[in-house]
Image (cartoon, rainbow, N blue to C red):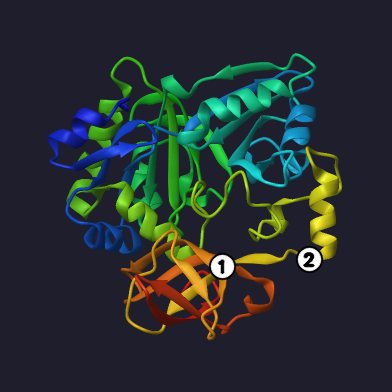
Amino acid sequence: MLNTPFTNIHIGLGAKMAEFAGYNMPISYTGINDEHATVRNNVGVFDVSHMGEFILKGPDALELIQRVTSNDASKLTAGKAQYSCFPNNNNGIVDDLIVYCIEPNNQYMLVVNASNIQKDWDWVSAHNTNNVEMHNISAKTALLAIQGPNACKMMQPLTDVDILNLQYYTFAKGTFAGVDNVLISATGYTGSGGIEIYFEDKDGNAEKIWNKIFEVGGPQGMKPIGLGARDTLRLEMGYCLYGNDIDDTTNPIEAGLGWITKFTKDFVNAEAIKAIKAEGPKRKLVGFEMIDKGIPRHGYIIKDAGGNEIGVVTSGTQAPSLNKAVGLGYVATELSAIDSEIFIDVRGRLLKAKVAKAPFA
């Protein structure tokens, strides 16, 4: 297994460790419910250094990004970021990603999922017909997500960047915890606000930043958070997880990602995806809440009242903030309306659920 710059710190703190995307990652420290509540109500710190980062440079960098991603990156100005995806040639999704505009038309950073780093690099490289300068900086980039309603207020003393007024999906570079050239972005996958910090893993920077963060935040209730709570937090918001809710076989329209699919430009497989939108998808990714007691899990079959199979659960959990079980899944379009009655097949028992709007309340 691969390690992040913080792996030994996690082990030293007694984290429950497990393999994730080839990395030895912390799943939980004090328990998923406690960690989840910490992020929703105060501040938690996630090690997400396993994520991938690519730098694209040169006069044709934007043109390449426009061809391989679904969203319109030409709208980005310096210091702005954008959620997007790489469509494949078979109506599916290679990966979802965030595009950071460092210098308009000339320099961008793509942040991709850990499990897809090589796959995504190969995909973008295969479409790089104009010799755009590409750098895979994943191995040398550390990334911490400092998330929660008090994150910016708590971390402001550590940086010269005005993070209290950093707008959602914008970023700035500056000094953080005494380390120069740190990219600080108002992004994250928890729905609780906060920042993510990207910096080069060299000269003991990782340990220095970690220690400074907890010197300031520890006395104020900040805690390290594992991937278990990261999953429950994103699921309460209805955010997709690649490999569960979207993958190489799911198209952006049925996955509810039409809002990041812009037909004002040409991109890989655009015409086929446009046709799916025009015709209407046969199934849709929906959120749902359990009515009967039971926890939906990835892969469970979704049925109608007559016991006919109509879809599949892609993610599910007992939501710690909501005191009820929720999930995401694909269902036949005719049963995708809010409040539609559906049934989850849990080990042979049909448990009643209803389609619900995410974020779940």
Asked if 257 appears above or below 144 in the picture, the reply is below
Q: Which residue is rendered at x = 52% and y = 33% of the image?
A: 116
Quarter occupied by residue 265: top right
Q: Residues within 10 Å of mark 2 (few under 14, many from 20)?
A: few
Asked if 224 appears above or below 2 in the picture, the reply is below
Q: Position of residue 341 (x, y in %)?
A: 54, 84
Location of the N terminus (image quadrant): top left
Q: Nearer the viewer, residue 129 or 71?
A: 129
Read off the residue under disc 2. 280
Q: Position of residue 281 (x, y in %)?
A: 74, 63
The answer to whether residue 43 is left or right of residue 241 is: left
Asked if 3 appears above or below 28 in the picture, the reply is above
Read off the residue under disc 1. 311
Which amino acid type is shown beneath numbered disc 1? Gly
Q: Nearer the viewer, residue 196 or 219?
A: 196
Labelled disc at residue 261: none
Which amino acid type is shown beneath numbered disc 2? Gly
Q: Secondary structure at mark 2?
A: loop
Quarter occupied by residue 81: top right
The answer to whether residue 207 is left or right of residue 117 is: left
Q: Which residue is rendered at x = 67% and y = 60% of the image?
A: 254
